[in-house]
Amino acid sequence: MRPIVTEHTTTDELLIRVKRNHSNVQRFLKVLSSYTCEPTDYNCFERLADLKDSFHKLKGEQEQLIASITTAPVLTSDLKNLVQLQLQQFQELEAMVAAYMLDSKSYY
């Protein structure tokens, strides 16, 4: 997988990516709370609860990251690495949501 954040990424680009990703996390939380994602068995219930917890945790981390990027005078490599990790974490959670949706629809 190629890096999403490079050494040439500017503060504005980084902030835009994180904010866009943050709005996607909020959208996924709304979808996971909707009736279309209601669990059909205990396994689905546990998976849904884990997904919601993971998205809530990521949402909080992103809010802290947005504050850090906004207040940082200069982007450090640690901050860029943190953004890269959070964007990858979102991609993994997105794949888990897709798998959950496919699995939960199999019971209908």
Image (spheres, rainbow, N blue to C red):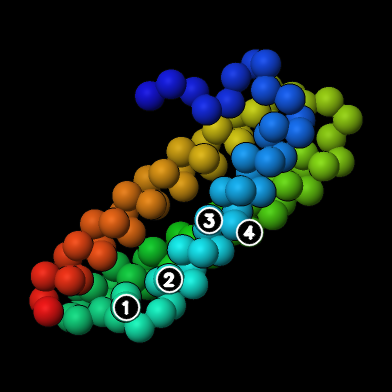
Q: Secondary structure at mark 4?
A: helix
User: Which disc is residue 31 wearing?
Assistant: 2
Q: Which quadrant is home to the C terminus?
A: bottom left
Disc 1 marks a residue whose amino acid type is: Thr
Precedes in sequence: disc 2 or disc 4: 2
Q: Residues within 10 Å of mark 1 (few under 14, many from 20)?
A: few
**Residue at point 17% right, 71% down?**
105
Horizontal relation, residue 17 to residue 27: left or right: right
Which residue position is annotated with label 1?
Answer: 36
Do the residues under discs 2 and 1 have CB atoms within 8 angstroms? yes
Horizontal relation, residue 15 to residue 98: left or right: right
> Label 3 vs label 2: CA separation?
10 Å
Residue 57 in sight: no
Which residue position is annotated with label 3?
Answer: 24
Precedes in sequence: disc 3 or disc 2: 3
Q: Residue 25 in the image: x percent, y percent?
A: 53, 58
Q: Which tag is nearer the camera, tag 4 or tag 1? A: 1
Q: Residues within 10 Å of mark 3 (few under 14, many from 20)?
A: some
